Structure formats: structure tokens, C-alpha cells
Image (spheres, helix red, strand yellow):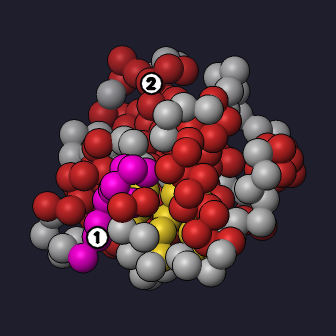
Amino acid sequence: MKFTLDTNCIIDLDLCRPSATNVQSLISAHRAGKAEVAFVAVSASERQPGDSYLDSFREFEARLKELNIDDIPLLLGMAYFDISYWDHAVFADEECDLEERIHNVLFPSVAFSYSDFKRLAPEATGDILTDKKWRNRWCDRQMMWAHVSNSRDVFVTSDNNFKKIERAESFEGVKVRTPEEAVALL
């Protein structure tokens, strides 16, 4: 079984949250050859502890090493100027439809493109917090895009918003589980 672990799973490990034990069980199953586990490289583009963004992908790799999970494979998201780390993203044009369909399921009331977001929400112009929220949504859709486009079995997250995709038309095969639920599948 192929599990995709989102950024919340890294945070669980980093902060020793209750779900960390389950995330660690999934990683142990991977290391024992009983499951296939991967993180998504887009996690490096998310807001990091201290409410900042990383200057380089090496900083993200150092964090993974510190958490002793640097041996877990990384799935690549789509390359976007000023958000992605170019050496850790794919240049995709045919898959844009999939990305937009994912966005429309997860965030139907938010503009897909950043320029449309800024144009349609002029009150958000210059609002860094709002810009951070749009970027967070971008990261979420990239997480799911990487999961779906790599034909993975189970998306693992504590973010209930991802559950919407299971009920969406044309995403019937997508399974979203919490770390605890995912461990029960082993």
C-alpha cells in the first residue's frame, strides 16, 4: 500500500503530537518493506515554525534529517515561480486541469490563480496574512496533486478539509485517512 504523508505528519513528528506515534508506525512499516511511504517536497514551501518560509530546500532537508526521516522518498509537486524549489518540482502543463479540479473541490470559494485572487479580493492586496492563506491552499492542492498524479493509495493527514475530495466526482478512488486510520490499514 502506498501512503502519502502531508505536512501535518511532519509537524506531528516535530512537535511530538499524539499522532506522531502513528506517523512513526507508518514510517517503520516503510522501512520494513511492508508499505510505501512518501512525503511531498511541497512541504518545504509551507510556512515553517516561527511563521517564516525557507530560503533553500537544503533547510528543509536538514529538518528532515533532524527528525530522522530524511530516508523517506519525496513526491514532487508542480513548479511555480516564487513558491516552488525548482530542483524539487516538475514542470507540468498537461496536469494543470487536475490541479484546478483539486483546487475547486478543496477551496471552491477561493480563486485558483494568485493574480485572480488578488484581483477578485482587492481588500486582500498587501494583506500578508491573506497571502499566506492563499499560499497554504496552493500547498494543499499540490499535496493532493502529487498524491493523485503518482497513483498513491492513501493520503494521510489530520486536516479534515481533504476529506471533501473523497466525495467529489472523478476522485472516487482517492482515500484520505488520519494517521491513526492509516495505521489500521497496515
SS assignment at label 2:
helix
Amino acid residing under circle 1: Val
Q: Horizontal and vertical percent for residue 16?
A: 62, 32
Q: Is residue 101 magenta?
A: no
SS assignment at label 1:
loop
Q: Can you say which quadrant of the picture contains the C terminus?
A: bottom left
Q: Can you say which quadrant of the picture contains the N terminus?
A: bottom left
Residue drawn at x 43%, y 51% is 179
Asked which quadrant contains residue 47, the reply is top right
Above-or-below relation of 122 to 105: above
Q: Horizontal and vertical percent for residue 3?
A: 48, 68
Give the CA distance from mark 2 to mark 1. Answer: 29 Å
Amino acid residing under circle 2: Thr
Check residue 174 in the rendering and tell me which mark sits there, or answer none: 1
Check residue 136 in the rendering and tell me which mark sits there, or answer none: none
Label 2 Cα neighbours within 10 Å, binned few <14 / some 14-19 / many ≥20: some
Residue 135 visible within the image: no
| Residue at the disc numbered 2 | 130
Magenta residues, as a range? 173-182
Above-or-below relation of 3 to 123: below
